[in-house]
Amino acid sequence: MLEIVLPDTGPLISLGLLERLDLIERFNSAVLVTDMVKYEALRGDEETPDRHTLERWFEKKTNQVQVVETTYGLMYEVLPPDMQRKIRLRRGAGENSIREFSQHVRETLPPGGRVLVLFEDQRVPNMDFGKHVHLLHTYAFLRTLENMGVIPSAMALVDELRAKERDLATDLFDRPAKMVDDEGANWVASLSGPGC
């Protein structure tokens, strides 16, 4: 079974601003988010445009969306708010969580397991999640959904994000998992709903 991994907040923020988190929910699989990604996604003041959308998404607490604890996230959680703000501003704070999570995926993925990593952070493709992991940029994900007829236009969504002052790179990065056989290597087969 395919698991979806969101190691950075980029896809959540972009899809949250578009109010299209349903596109992630179209997978018939678990969606794994690190605790630090959740903290970062829900940061900021009440006026942040995507905050309420993301809060509702996390509050649904379906079995599909699972928050994975990391050592970094557990330490962060017990700090006083003023220290949390300082750490959040430090370069590499979230990256430590991503590195720990990539190691977790690499070490716990069973031989037949499949993972789709949906990302926007440009450091993610250089991290070792293991050979059975498919890396896909949010824009490449949207383009695939457009080609499948699930959404009318990936570029229209990019333009909508730009109008909301978020610049989603039109990055077509798509690195398939290296499978022993080709059976089940295609993440598209795990989508459900109209147009799939």
Image (cartoon, rainbow, N blue to C red):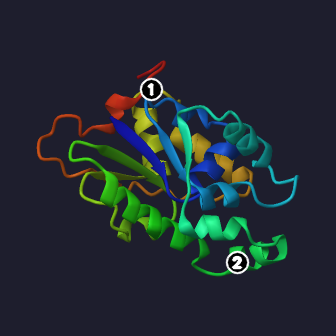
Element class at badge 2: helix
Residue sitting at x 19%, y 52%: 178
Residue sitting at x 33%, y 54%: 108
The relative height of residue 180 versus residue 81 in the rendered view (above or below) is: above
Q: Which residue is mark 2?
A: 87
Q: Position of residue 142 (x, y in %)?
A: 48, 42
Q: Which residue is mark 1?
A: 149
Amino acid under disc 2: Ile
Residue 23 image-quadrant placement: top right
Does residue 122 show up?
no
Q: Position of residue 105 (x, y in %)?
A: 37, 56
The relative height of residue 79 versus residue 32 in the rendered view (above or below) is: below
Amino acid under disc 1: Gly
Viewer-side label of 1, 2: 2
Q: Residue furthest left?
A: 181
The relative height of residue 92 versus residue 172 in the rendered view (above or below) is: below
Residue 65 image-quadrant placement: top right
